[in-house]
Image (cartoon, rainbow, N blue to C red):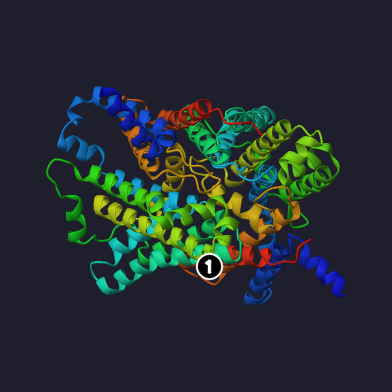
Amino acid sequence: MGRGIVAEIGRNLNALGIRRFGLALLALTVIMATVLWLRPNIASYNGLRLLLSLSPVLVFTALAQMFVMTAGDIDLGIGPYVGLVNCVVAGLLRDQPVLASALLLCCPLSYGLMGALVHVRQLPSIVVTLGASFIWLGLALTVLPLPGGNVPVWVTSFVRLRPPGIPLPIILAFVPMVVAHLVLNKMSYGVVLRGIGGSLSAVERAGRSTLKARMSLYALAGCCGLFAGLCLAAVTTTGDANVGRGLTLLSIGAVIIGGGEFVGGIVSPIGTVLGALIMQLSGSLLSFASVAPAWQYSVQGCILLTILALRVVSWRRVRI
Amino acid sequence: MNALGGRLLSQPSFYASAGAVIVWLVIVVYSGGMGAGAVASAALNYSVFFAIVGLGQMLVMASGAGNIDLSIPANVTLAAYLSTGQMMGSDSGLILGVLIALAAGAAIGAGNALLVLAFRIPPMVATLASGLVLESFTFVYSRISVAKPSPLLAEFTTDRLFGIPDVTLAAIVASLILIVFLKQSLFGRSLFACGQNETAAWLSGINIRWTRVAAYVLCGVFTSLAGILFAGFVGGPSLNMGSEFLLSSIAVVVIGGTNVAGGQATVIGTWSASLFLFLLLSMLNVFQVDPGLRNVATGVLIIAVLALNKSRPAQ
């Protein structure tokens, strides 16, 4: 009887892709346990709420990066894009709601068009998104030349919500994770989406539009970036064009820690969210452990390297 | 004539070079012919640092798809602090400072190669993480050192011979050597072979590992060199001096016409793209475009040059 349940759980975990994100889950558990050991007070509704208040930003940014990486591409502009959304929300949404909403709607659309450009002209995504990063930054500076602005009250009050039982940041990590998992791994169109990263010609021969698939992935990334920018504006209550600079690299790290690969088609939405939480929490962990600020970057880099080196050892991939 | 035109167009570096010339002409015409030399001279002086870093990034990218060095900004800053910290404003520490910084650059490159090749961590994440580690060291070192470039170094980076900065002349000579080296030497040929087809390169007896290690080490050394020179140019290091090299190092390589998938590289293209990007910013400055739109224009032009470059006839 007991063995049956264990086997059942094992089968379910396998179906979710535990092999891909298992190490991330383990790492997150270790980090969370250490945080709780250092600061037992955090094990409460408010403690978790404060500890994770900024995590939705990175969760959504990492998911955006993941959608682009599903196509076998890479997005070097997602950070400035989140900064742009942040600036539109802080600089325009209160005084010119119609214009701001139109702009916010255009953001994911322009991402879809960027995907089309990459696809049709067969351009390296790394450079197109790099060029786009200047465009996002420039637009953000035009909307809000100096940090500041006013975030509408209804946006900020959203993150102050206190749903019973589970703190909001945890819901904001869990819900997008489930949605992304359903889209990529459960929906039948998810096969096409993952397929263009794996084998473009196979998808083409199956009679599916590869252009549409890549545009969808980029538009999904644009939507996630939009949510990330909204969360950022809501939590910080200000706008800053340069705020997203560090997010790009963190988001790539999160996807890779979560079991994703650069080759395309191999990503794990669950792992990505876990990876984002790892990146977010390792910062807090280090300040709780009173590591000198100067060395925090260093230790964060080492955590990243350790997880990835462990993954290589545990997977024992075949050489050349 | 047509054949010549076709040959020119098929050069990977054509669009970046043409772009640089066009932008320069626009500036000259707009300013009524005044300061044409000064603009060119300033461009040559400023873009040399980006060209040197770009050449390092170019070697890494040419060694195969996915290879990239994101630790460049941290390496630039560290080299600037290490060298000027040794100089402390006098020429007596110049040689030692330069040597220490270059050795550190080589070690950083070797470390990156170790992570990528021995631990099989994807280059993008491995170099990102090593950059984070370097940032800590730089931060700590910056607080215990008196960092000031030696007068000789400062002079070398800003003095001009016949209107061309000394440092640029030296870098051009070095680049010409690099062109010949990449074309003729065993390393150059192995590098492109690895980038084009790893299996074929391996079957033909090329040591893929050591070739890639060499690419990363050279990139580390070039980056350190740029860091030392840049510190001399701006009169001393600062903690965020490397940040602008992250995106521009990738941009100059790819706009220059080097293939991101590896196997092919162009030294001239990387130089042209560095000049193009600097002249572009100067042009937008001359037109007094506000900073926001300046960024937008830069982004649009980067994508436009790339799209044009991609449409050139196959070689």
Specify few, some or many for label 1: CA neighbours under 10 Å numbering under 14, 14-19, or 20 or more.
Answer: some
Determine which quarter of the picture holds residue A216: bottom left
Question: Residue lying farthest front?
Answer: A1
Name the residue type under label 1. Answer: Ala
Does residue B148 appear anywhere in the picture? no
- Left or right side of B73 for A12: left
Determine which quarter of the picture holds residue B224: top right
Determine which quarter of the picture holds residue B37: bottom right
The relative height of residue A121 versus residue B268 in the rendered view (above or below) is: below
Residue at image point 64% right, 71% down: B27
- Left or right side of A183 for B268: right
- Foreground pick, A102 / A212: A212
Indicate the quadrant containing the C terminus of chain B: top left, top right, bottom left or bottom right: bottom right
> In the rendering, at what x and y percent does residue B51 appear?
67, 50
> In the rendering, at what x and y percent does residue A94 appear?
23, 67
- Left or right side of A134 for A177: left
> In the rendering, at what x and y percent does residue A150 appear?
24, 61
The relative height of residue A5 versus residue B67 in the rendered view (above or below) is: above
Chain holding disc 1: B
- Foreground pick, A135 / A205: A205
Residue at image point 73% right, 60% down: B13
Residue at image point 69% right, 74% down: B33
- The residue that disc 1 covers is B297
> In the rendering, at what x and y percent does residue A249 appear?
46, 44
Q: Could you say whether the residue bearing mark 1 is in a helix, strand or loop?
A: helix
